[in-house]
Image (tube, rainbow, N blue to C red):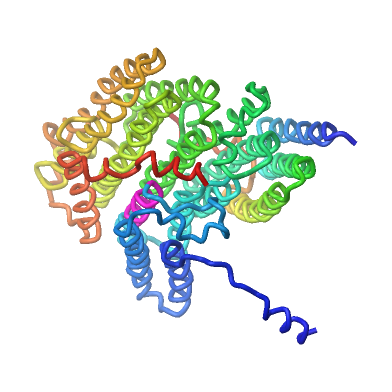
Amino acid sequence: MLINNFLLLGAVLFCIGVYGVIARKNAVMVLMSIELILNSVNINLLAFSQLHDNVDGNTFALYIIAVAAAEVGVGLAMVLLIYRNRKSISLDELSEMKG
Amino acid sequence: MIASLLAAAGDFVAPVADYHALAPEIVLAAGICLVLLVDLFVEERQRWITSTLAGFVLLGAFIPVVTLAVIGGDVRNGLGGDVLDGRYVIDEYALILKALFLIAGYVVVLMSSDEIESGRYHQGEYYVLLLTSVLGMVMMASSRDLISIFVALEFLSIPAYMLAAWNKRNSKGNEAGMKYYLLGVFASAIMLYGMSLLYGVTGTTLLSEIGPAITANGQFSGIEALAVVFIVVGFAFKVSAVPFHQWAPDVYEGAPTPITAFLSVASKAAGFVALTTLVFLAFPLASDVYQPFIWVLSAASMTVGNLLALRQTNIVRMLAYSSISQGGFILMPLTVAGEAGVGESALKAVVVYLVVYAATNLGAFAVVIAVAKKTRSGDISSFGGLFSYAPALGVLMTVFLASLAGIPPLGGWFAKFGAFKAVLDAGTNWGYSIAIIAALNTVIAAAYYITVMREIWMKPVPDGDVTPIRTPSSIQAALVITCGATIVLGVLPDLVGRFGDLSDLTGALGR
């Protein structure tokens, strides 16, 4: 199998993720889109690690998985906070401050 | 099972680690655990202990930084080169920035103690998160590897997201936290994609090996350009460079004011540190890509930040846009970092600007906190007649604003001088054009700083209430430190100019 297949999968996931972050109005959907981008990075890193035959990429991917879990923990807590105060998690309504 | 393990343990050789070189990080990590424990066992009305303790932890971590600087020489080999392999380096550049982050953290603790105590909740957690974020910044100063840069970046960002949302019953606080979180995480995801491409092209995550490998095939490939651009975009979000700045004013307004000061100084400086390290170590051969890109970011940040600052009526939002525009000045030397012979003065200009800007901006925020305790307002007009009833605060605010505007003999003047000198030394069209734009922006910036000064010195007190302001002693201490640093760095600039020698940073290349 060519490395191109993996990189293509990574690029497609990245684009879906970026589209999701820009187009979605629901905070949880945006969080999931960001996870897609992070996973596209992981696919890239693992494919390149195989290509270069060293473990740097694998190590990097492990760190990203761990840090992404921590990030999502904070993100969901914040979504919950907003839901408690506003009874809505739509990002469009978060526009009190302007200028 | 255990017998075989014990038998194997005889062959175990502990890796060589220089605990002196790692002492700042170790002290901070131990201090974080200590503050967390003390918070558990101390009664509610004695929680002020956590703030005192956090201050001592930061000062305690500062001691090994000083001793390492005094030892001097090649401390980076002391780490036991085989273990960390040049991925985590303690050199003069790292030490001066560690000192900056620790002192900035200490000043933020001083500014917070009164506000957080009189406020509502969770003192212990506040200081734990603050210390964790400072630990991430201290790690960032030493990181010379894509993985350690990423880990340090998340280490400093994740606690900062929570601190920005600290006023959790307040809808502005929620909005600030959510915006900061989403854009911050999105930016680091983009940056990671760039890093994965960079690893793919070069086959290593060590910055000093990426540098020479980046044009290994003789030509600059498209995928390399993409990687560089994605990484710079990721950090442009972090340092709130235009056009990636939209989050900054909202977050600064919604977060508690001490945290605003922390984000606008320390968190931003950490982004610049990472960007500088990458530009000098990983991208020296990619200057064709990053130079025009950073040129645009720098020019846009100065101009847009200034023009938007002119029409603000809220002092915190004005300082937010002013910090975006100052960020443009810090980026300015990086636009010529790749030119032959300019590297050293460009690096020095960035480091000096970061130090001076930290002292000045923290001071300005300390005055804003002190004044807001009385006026309970964030409007610029609430500074009216400040000099008549609080002369000390009025004079100090004038000093800080004058330094931000770059009026001699204050620190801000010397920082701007260094930045201009670096771009003019390059003698290229890119350098001259950015210098012209920066000169115009210095004039525009003076306009809104002087507006605030006019309120302080010439306008009447808005509601005729001239009872003097009682400034808590912790904020007085913060003001003394920041004002002293602002003036001393202006009068004796050699103090900091000696540090940040390029030879030390590129010395890591030889490894």
Q: Is residue B165 visible?
A: no
Question: Can you say whether A40 is above or below B121 in the image?
Answer: above
Identify the residue shown where x is 35% and y is 59%.
B68
Question: Can you say whether B492 is above or below B345 in the image?
Answer: below
Check residue B15 for magenta coloring. no
Q: In the visual, does B61 lie left or right of A8?
A: left
Check residue B102 for magenta coloring. yes
Q: Quadrant of residue B488?
A: top left
Identify the residue shown where x is 68% and y is 49%.
A56
Front position in the image: B102 or B181: B102
Q: Is residue B57 visible?
A: yes
Question: Can you say whether B181 is above or below B12 in the image?
Answer: above
Residue B53, position in %: x, y? Answer: 35, 70
Front position in the image: B119 or B302: B302
Identify the residue shown where x is 33% and y is 31%.
B345
Residue B155, position in %: x, y? Answer: 53, 54
The quadrant in which the N terminus of chain B is found is: bottom right
Front position in the image: B171 or A69: A69
Prevailing secondary structure of the magenta residues: helix
Q: In the visual, does A40 lie left or right of B327?
A: right
- Residue segment shown in magenta: B93-105
Residue B361, position in %: x, y? Answer: 30, 42
Count all numbered tags in the image, as a single digit: 0
Q: Residue furthest right?
A: A1
Q: Quadrant of residue B253?
A: top left
Residue B349, position in %: x, y? Answer: 33, 34
Front position in the image: A37 or A26: A37
